[in-house]
Amino acid sequence: MRLLQNAGRVGDNITAAFGNIAHEVTGKQVFNPTAAHSIVVEALEKNKSSEALARRIWLSFVVEGKDTLYQDDIVEVLGSDQRAEAEECFASLDRDGNGDISLDEMILTVCEIGRERKSIASSLHDVDQAIVVLDNLLCTIVFVICIFVFGTARFKSPFAFLNSSFTTTLATAGTALLSMSFVFATTAQEVLGSCIFLFVKHPFDVGDRIDIGEEQLVVERISLLFTVFKRIKTHKTTQVPNIVLNGVWIDNVTRSKAMREQLLMYISFDTTIEDIQLLKSEMRNFVLDKENARDFQPDIDVEVTGIAEMNKMELKVEIKHKSNWANETVRASRRSKFMCALVLALRKIPIYAPGGGGATLGSSDMPSYSVSISDAEAASNRDAFAKTKEEKRLIPSKKLEAAPATSTSTETDQSSESTLRNRSDTAKSSVPKSESAASAALNA
């Protein structure tokens, strides 16, 4: 192991020597592994070295005894003559825009920069490979055309298109290709659509977090005719043709800026507007807290969006993040933190679920029992309830229905009496028929 390390150091020294010679000739820093730029680029290639680099930079600039890095600290180290560069560096590191940089934020930002560099390098490599494949395909087509144009040795002219029989040969070849067009039509359409999708539209790069419909994916590899994705939920590898992706909606989360999220919940129908305002105040205090201000914007919205079947209210809580959701681990952590704070606020006010808030039926706080009353008392209670319900109406309904109801009841009574008469007449006529039938049977 030591021998390998020593060999690496020797190689670095040799490279540095050539770099110094090139620097003397060109005036640029090249082939110098000990230069600051080379050390930083090498450290960004791995996650652990990126974290170590972030700690080293943060501890080199922060004032002793403080736990956050400010813009003035960077200006003090670089000098007042480089104030513009210091402001640019601080703006690139302070992604949440709260005016200071903590150690965790520094580590997260530097590691994200390292991942972006690797993704850009992989994307450039994949696009270069796709261009090579397209170049080989076009060279093959040109080669086939050259065979038709210059490949006939029996032509007297040095150029086939100047010969009189070339037209006949070209017509024959064109007819043959036209008859086989159904074989190459799909392939040609796929190649053309993939080229437009990859080189013209180019909706994503390697490492981007995208959403296609309900699927959450991460781009792993880009080729000329297909793209390889990794599913966020199951980490399964999925290969999708580019011609299919050319006709779907693609949401690129990595290229998006600060995003917002909406949470829908159902609450008790008895909830008052004062309780909803208290909930909004509690959640605003949460996002304005020093520990949470790095993750969420101060704007928060709580809105009642529906009342369902008048048995519950639909409540929408909208939060705004200070970054996108490209990093799934960070997004899940922030969302879990907000959900726990929301649950605590709902319990503190309190706001209950639909049908909640009361004691359970059958418990000691709300026992269940039954009583027996007479029919007359039950009828009296029903009439009293109906009367009270009718008195609450803005326009009484019984007055409007009094006349039609009377005529209808009269007609109903008359029809019932006629029905009873018909039934009695039928019964009387059936009696003698039955007696005559019985006597005829006895005589027989």
Image (tube, rainbow, N blue to C red):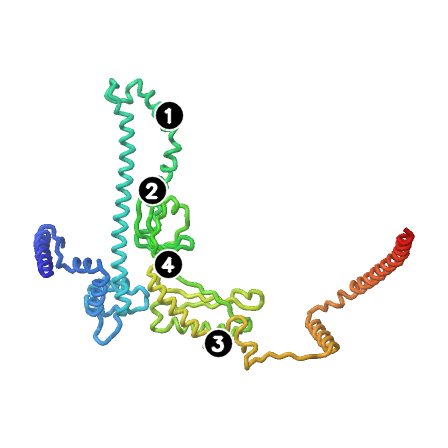
- Tag 1's secondary structure? helix
- The mark that comes first in sequence, 1 or 3, is 1
Q: Is residue 76 visible?
A: no
- The mark that comes first in sequence, 1 or 2, is 1
- Tag 4's secondary structure? loop
Separation of disc 3 and disc 4 at Cα? 34 Å
Tell me the amino acid under the disc marked 4.
Lys
On screen, residue 439 versus residue 166, left or right, reads right
Residue picked out by circle 2: 195
Tell me the amino acid under the disc marked 3.
Pro
Tell me the amino acid under the disc marked 1.
Thr
**Which label is found at residue 350?**
3
Other-residue count near label 4 (Cα within 10 Å), few / some / many at <14 / 14–19 / ≥20:
few
Separation of disc 3 and disc 2 at Cα? 58 Å
Pair 4/1: label in front:
4
On screen, residue 421 versus residue 245, left or right, reads right
Other-residue count near label 1 (Cα within 10 Å), few / some / many at <14 / 14–19 / ≥20:
few
Residue picked out by circle 1: 175
Pair 3/4: label in front:
4
Tell me the amino acid under the disc marked 2.
Cys
Q: Position of residue 398 (x, y in %)?
A: 75, 68
**Which label is found at residue 233?**
4
Based on the displayed image, in which of its 4 quarters is residue 282 positioned?
bottom left
